[in-house]
Image: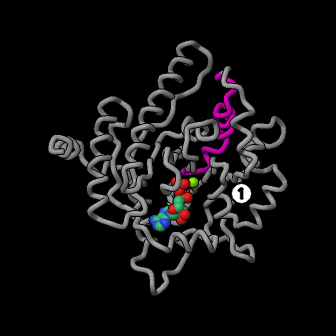
């Protein structure tokens, strides 16, 4: 069965899309079958991987992208999958094994289309049901979420098992992390209540399994930020707001112009070559992060976590 993973934070610009896209590519390069699902109306992951010309066709047609699955009869989730999505200008497949469910701007209508009333007709129920057909085809299904927990994001939150939270070395990331832990807990209680009431067979949201530091450019700043996140994560673990396995990843992604360059040329970072003027090779950081994710082992032992909290 596929490991189902959401990249989620209440903070925008923190690196959800960059992590989802580049880690998905690395996982495919490690021989895994990967499906990336773009759940953000901004469509950044879709535009990045399809490049503007292909994505524009989709956006103008208005069907074949994620929103189509919520109009009965228009398309199902398997219809929307673009196989081996990354191509060069001649159409040669550059990342075999990486598929995409793309999104275009019409996804914004999802937030107003559905009433909040009946849990059984919620968009995430429709999404989850259709995702079942795809699960056996993949090792990883990765959800790139918007910076909220509204209806589109809930498709990922309620379909995944594992939630990873990207963070920058700043206070806003810590605040966003705190709010997210509380919200996921509320969603869990609410979905437990539906099940107790017998309204539907919905499972709960995924668990917070880890924090990934992204766009790091100062060791001292990130050490302090990491200590604060570790304290919060430990609280979450003791209140059941995060998995007992939750960890801070050892691998951090440095801030580098290579990431900006990748976006502007429409190629994922692992497919770029390094320019002479660029310090370091961020491709290796993404590869190490993918391998750490594949291991699925806690990077910080529980005892170490308690000691750090006690000494903070
Ligand atoms: N490691 C990095 N180094 C430099 N810039 C980065 C890095 N990661 C992300 N960015 C830049 O930060 C911006 C926001 O990243 P993005 O992944 O789109 O965030 P989110 O999806 O959380 O809104 C983008 O312009 C992206 O190019
Ligand atoms: Mg994004």
Q: Nearer the viewer, residue 301 or 183?
A: 183
> Which SS type dominates the magenta stretch?
helix
Q: Find the magenta span and give its range.
A: 119-141
Residue at 56% x, 12% y is 197
Report x, y in % for residue 76: 76, 42
Residue 117's image quarter? top right
Judged left or right of residue 231, residue 111 is right
* Mark 1 close to ligand 2, CB under 8 Å: no
Is residue 22 visible in the rendered image? The answer is no
Report x, y in % for residue 21: 56, 60
Residue 198's image quarter? top right
Judged left or right of residue 154, residue 310 is left
Residue at 49% x, 74% y is 257
Look at the picture and state if 275 lies above or below 166: below
Report x, y in % for residue 233: 32, 41
Residue at 37% x, 46% y is 174
> Where in the image, quadrant-wise, is ligand 2 located?
bottom right
Q: Nearer the viewer, residue 206 or 57?
A: 57
Direction front: furthest residue: 171
User: Is-magenta flag for residue 159?
Assistant: no
- The structure's colour scheme is one colour
Q: Which residue in the structure is indicated by mark 1?
A: 82
Is residue 92 visible in the rendered image? The answer is yes
Report x, y in % for residue 97: 61, 61
Q: Quadrant of the C terminus?
A: top left
Element class at badge 1 = loop
Direction bottom: furthest residue: 276
Q: What number of labels is visible?
A: 1
Residue at 81% x, 61% y is 57
Residue 265's image quarter? bottom right
């Amino acid at each position: 069965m596929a490991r189902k993973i959401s990249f989620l934070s209440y903070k925008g610009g923190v690196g959800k899309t960059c992590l989802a896209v580049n880690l998905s590519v690395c996982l495919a390069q490690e021989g895994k079958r990967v499906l990336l699902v773009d759940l953000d109306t901004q469509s950044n992951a879709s535009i990045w991987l399809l490049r503007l010309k292909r994505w524009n066709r989709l956006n103008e047609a208005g069907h074949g992208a994620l929103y189509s699955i919520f109009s009965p009869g228009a398309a199902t989730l398997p219809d929307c999958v673009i196989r081996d999505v990354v191509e060069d200008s001649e159409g040669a497949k550059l990342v075999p094994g990486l598929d995409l469910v793309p999104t275009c701007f019409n996804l914004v209508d999802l937030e107003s289309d559905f009433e909040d009333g009946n849990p059984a007709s919620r968009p995430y129920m429709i999404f989850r049901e259709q995702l079942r057909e795809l699960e056996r085809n993949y090792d990883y299904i990765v959800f790139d979420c918007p910076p909220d927990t509204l209806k589109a994001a809930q498709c990922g939150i309620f379909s995944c098992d594992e939630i990873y939270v990207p963070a920058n070395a700043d206070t806003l990331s810590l605040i966003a992390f705190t709010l997210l832990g509380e919200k996921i807990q509320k969603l869990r209680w609410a979905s437990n209540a539906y099940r107790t009431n017998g309204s539907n067979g919905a499972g709960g949201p995924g668990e917070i399994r880890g924090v990934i530091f992204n766009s790091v450019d100062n060791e001292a700043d990130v050490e302090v930020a990491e200590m604060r996140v570790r304290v919060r994560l430990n609280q979450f673990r003791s209140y059941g707001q995060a998995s007992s396995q939750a960890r801070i990843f050892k691998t951090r992604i440095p801030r580098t112009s290579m990431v900006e360059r990748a976006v502007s040329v429409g190629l994922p970072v692992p497919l770029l070559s390094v320019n002479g003027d660029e310090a370091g090779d961020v491709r290796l950081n993404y590869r190490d992060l993918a391998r750490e994710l594949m291991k699925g082992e806690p990077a910080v032992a529980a005892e170490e976590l308690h000691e750090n909290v006690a000494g903070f």
